[in-house]
Image: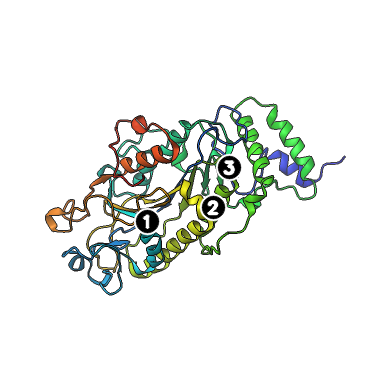
Amino acid sequence: MAWDISRRVFLRGAGLAALGVGFHPSSLLVRTAQAAAAGSRVLVQVFLRGGCDGLNLCVPFGDSEYYALRGGIAIGRGEVVNLDGHFGLHPALAPLKALYDDGRLALLPAVGNYGLSRSHFDAQDFMESGTPGDKSTGTGWLGRSISKVPGNAVTEAVAFSAQLPRSFLGPEPVLVAQTLSSFDLRARGWRGEAETLLRAMYDARDDAIGHVGQETFAAMNVLLRTPEIMAPPAGGAVYPNASIGNALRQAAQIVKAGIGTRAIFVNVPGAFDTHANQLAAHTLEFTRLADALVAFARDLGGLMDDVAVMVTTEFGRVAFVNGSAGTDHGSAHCMILMGGRVRGGRVHGSWPGLGRSQLYQERDLAVTTDFRDVFAELARAQLGVDASSLFPGYTPGPGPGIVS
């Protein structure tokens, strides 16, 4: 049979041409697409890139210094969604109040590490590797975590991102996708023939390229043969049409399908670098964040008992407003924690205060909780791993007691 141009181009590129999917090429073992051997709990990390301002996310309206420092970007007392008389939510996050009151959502302000720096790229790399100040770490904290989990499922680790996030760097295979519904071969009209040819090509190789191809077909076999993956949202959940909404909708589909996934990374592009016009940016982005989290909880229903969501960012913002109605790069930030085992309905951690002498370098909210202690606590609770050696050069403490 004569080859047409689409076949020649397809094979010349020697690529799987799977839409929106990739695998980390350093995996050395062929993984089967079987469910993980132990545990059903899932850890979801949502990474808000850009440095989200925690002081206007979890508003310390009860701190006497807040309004003087924040000026025109302060959230008025009449607008704050009161949580406990001292802290409150930004009004765009109001939909989260019901989850907070129900004991399934908590906040942790003043978290971070000064070694993260105020550089976006360095801080993101340091946080994802779990080794602030050390650029030599070649693996990610989630990659190290998932390597400790029993089982060998291709779909054990999933990232909704344009590329493999540093958090998952390591020898374990990671399903990297943006759109699960288009996870298939680009071979319209001759898909069966293309799959046969490509499988033969990759199966014949006993190297990293061959293993990546084999793992990709294993994952494709699971996804295309699991109809629950494409099930519509349940419980009347409505996700916002934004990157975080689309990613969490698909994360819920993965959880509901029960294909052995234990860790999910959701990448949210850098819309939180609010050097100017912060109020308008937060109104839009916090609305999307709140609507996506509420939809995710509603969609999963009782399955949320086994899921923990951790919303993070690389650093917080300066305590005081700048001349462009925004905030510059700071230190401590605020995490949002959500799940059935989360000790919700409270603001965790120790509040350092906003007085000039209490600020870090007289400009930033001070760090009172090391982010690695939180990561370790969630890894122990959700993945069942020994976190004592999870972070090179650091022994995590008991954690802030976020999960039961």
Which quadrant would residue 11 be assigned to in this image? top right
Which residue does the numbered mark 1 point to in the structure image? 103
Looking at the rendered structure, the kind of residue marked 1 is Gly
In front: 167, or 151?
151
Q: Secondary structure at mark 1?
A: loop
How far is mark 3 from mark 2, CA to CA?
20 Å
Q: Quadrant of the C terminus?
A: top left
Q: Secondary structure at mark 3?
A: strand
Q: Position of residue 339 (x, y in %)?
A: 42, 51
How far is mark 3 from mark 1, CA to CA?
37 Å
In front: 356, or 224?
224
Asked if 217 appears above or below 52 in the picture, the reply is above
Q: Position of residue 50 (x, y in %)?
A: 38, 55
Looking at the rendered structure, the kind of residue marked 3 is Gly
Q: Which numbered disc covers residue 22?
A: 3
Q: Does residue 55 appear anywhere in the picture?
A: yes
Residue occupying image coordinates x 29% and y 32%:
395
Query: Position of 73 compared to 103: left or right?
Result: left
Asked if 268 appears above or below 30 in the picture, the reply is below
Question: Mark 3 packing: few (<14 Cα in 10 Å), some, or many (20+)?
Answer: many
Proximity of marks 3 and 1: CB atoms separated by less than 8 Å:
no
Please report whichever mark, 3 or 1, sits nearer to the chain's N-terminal start. 3
Q: Secondary structure at mark 2?
A: helix
Q: Nearer the viewer, mark 2 or mark 1?
A: 1
Looking at the rendered structure, the kind of residue marked 2 is Ala
Q: Position of residue 138 (x, y in %)?
A: 42, 33
